[in-house]
Image (cartoon, rainbow, N blue to C red):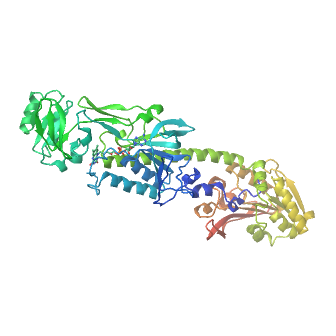
Amino acid sequence: MPGHPSRWGRRRGDRLARADVPSDTAHHLLVCHNSKIACRCGGGGCSVDGERNTTGRCQVGDRYDVVVVGGGAAGLAGALALARARRSVLVVDAGEPRNAPAGGVHNYLTREGTPPGELLAAGRAEVTGYGGQIVTGRVRTAARDDGGFSLTLADASVLRARRLLVTTGLVDELPEVPGLARRWGRDVLHCPYCHGWEVRDRRIGVLATGPTGVQQAQLWRQWSPHVLLLVHDAPPPNADELEELAAREITVVDGPVAELVVAGDTLTGVRLADGGVVDLDALVVAPRFTARAGLLADLGLAPVEVELGGHVFGTQIPADPSGATAAAGVWVAGNVADVRAQVISAAAAGLTAAAAINADLVAEETREAVRERRHRVATMFTEQAWEQRYTSRPAVWSGRPNPQLVAEASDLAPGRALDVGSGEGADAVWLARRGWRVTAVDISRTALQRAAAHADDAGVADRVDWVHADVREQPPVEASYDLVSAQFMHLPGEERDVLFARLAGAVAVGGTLLIVGHHPWDLRTSVHRMHLPEMMYTPQELATGLDPAVWDVRAEARPRTAVDPQGREITIHDAVLVARRRS
Ligand SMILES: Cc1cc2nc3c(=O)[nH]c(=O)nc-3n(C[C@H](O)[C@H](O)[C@H](O)COP(=O)(O)OP(=O)(O)OC[C@H]3O[C@@H](n4cnc5c(N)ncnc54)[C@H](O)[C@@H]3O)c2cc1C
């Protein structure tokens, strides 16, 4: 049986350290919260936003809660939510967002027309402002490693993460027409919602490269009355389609397109294979949207084809609505998971995935905490655990007698006392000084040696018998003591009931049983306590074990002033049972 098991409150324990330290610190990261420092190291090819170590060189951590691969809208939105959730998060970004060639981002509520680079720069500042890190680099491979993942970058550096959020976007595979790729995103367009307004009422050619060309032309007709369908290498429209196109006054131009015609830096038209030129202000194409997902191959994730009307127009990584993939611990968001995602929906998907990742980490941490707690509870009351505790410091307790003992025993006539869990002996020495003959029992030899030395110093060594025992296994002799005192003895429920019944049995007729513990109310305060509610008790719970025909009982929650870890004075309560044995 432990000596003073619940004087836990006087030591700083693991729980506080864990709760007070953000998980990034636990992973040995250097993080500048709210830092706007942009560190650009030479040589290693890395650059980190928001962090600089004391030598001024870039430094990334050794393991992150989450590494986000890809720093576009999806990745940054995910990283922002994770950083705000106090997760250590690193974004690795190759710096090639899909919409980079565009002049502005449209349909992003409140940010209408913002240049893509400006939007991302603001997003990066928000992420680093909350302690997230961003490194420029390209992840080549990802593999499982020690319950998490290890990522190898193009420069051969390796990162480790508990979870992955992959937001690498997609590649727009453009039709191979000379001059076309150079004008991509400027006057070679694909998305009417992104660019339609900007080319409204202009001459728009739709380059058909598959069966969806007709629908595309009809869609763009919403933005301009001057739409031409360039049949190029697509199957020619059927009779119904020709009628629809005619009804919408969309001109059909047969024959392949040979090249784009550009004057200065402006598209002016296309040249057909037969040499004819069609004047245009914009050319609409239907790229194939290919998920950038090569790095997921080693994790068993492959893109699937996305069809529209039987026509494959791209690939994406399958995932559930939260972005969780078939590979445990790997989430995807944005265009890599959804070819249709726009900037605002990619950002929303990043946030959704981040919340799911955080929930997954919380669940894992709870499972670990339960495992640890079970182990701790199973081992904390052993002789070895108490020896470890006492030998870890020269004195565990204050050396002062417990206040409720002083309050209750000061007026008692001295007799034989049993001090259960006597620790370093302050209560036993106090009783001996007042004339009691004390049997002091503890599970720790170190505690007993210290206690005996204190008794020597106090000149009462001859009045105390120091007994090394586990009272759970060696119960005290029945009806032998005028005072039995157990101060802050907190044990698992069943063991406690058995022990306290034995302690009651050890009280002689006319004697007093004094049991004092930390009241469960203390857990509602800011006082430092190990969180073991099932081992705390109310005085009323203690009283129910005593037969009113035999005992006069006082069961009280007594307030006491204590100082919490922040140095504030607060009120805590002792659960106090004072029972006098009548017969
Ligand atoms: C020309 C054009 C104009 C557009 N205009 C608009 C518009 O006005 N409004 C709108 O809502 N949408 C627009 N879009 C669509 C928009 O670009 C996408 O919806 C958006 O970019 C998707 O965001 P994302 O985060 O999924 O991917 P991206 O923005 O493409 O970001 C992916 C990031 O991941 C990085 N990356 C890829 N692989 C790796 C790797 N292995 N390691 C590290 N980093 C990697 C890339 O370099 C990139 O920075 C436009 C698209 C194009 C092509």
**In the image, 332: left or right of 266?**
right
Residue that lies at the very extreme toward the right in this rendered image = 462
In the picture, the quarter occupied by the C terminus is bottom right
Q: Position of residue 315 (x, y in %)?
A: 33, 33
Q: Check the image and name the residue furthest to the front.
A: 264
The x, y position of residue 140, in whole percent, is: 46, 37
The residue that appears at 75% across and 71% down in the rendered structure is 407
From the viewer's perspective, is residue 211 above or below residue 220? above
Residue 133 showing in the rendered view: no
- Please identify the quarter of the rendering in which residue 146 is found: top right
Residue 557 x, y percent position in the rendering: 65, 66
Of residue 70 and residue 45, the one placed in the foreground of this image is: 45
- Image quarter of residue 305: top left
Q: Eyeballing the image, is 39 above or below 556?
A: above
* 64 sits left or right of 232 in the view: right
In the displayed structure, does residue 553 sit left or right of residue 210?
A: right
Q: Residue at x 37, y 47 (%)?
A: 72
- Front residue (pair 470, 112): 112
Asked whether residue 474 is in view, the answer is yes
Q: Ligand 1 lies in which image quarter?
A: top left
Question: What residue is drawn where x is 44% and y is 35%?
Answer: 296
- Name the residue at the bottom extreme: 411
Residue 579 pos. (x, y %): 75, 63
Q: Nearer the viewer, residue 112 or 304?
A: 112
Decide if residue 263 is on the left or right side of residue 484.
left
Q: Give the residue drawn at x 10%, y 30%.
A: 240
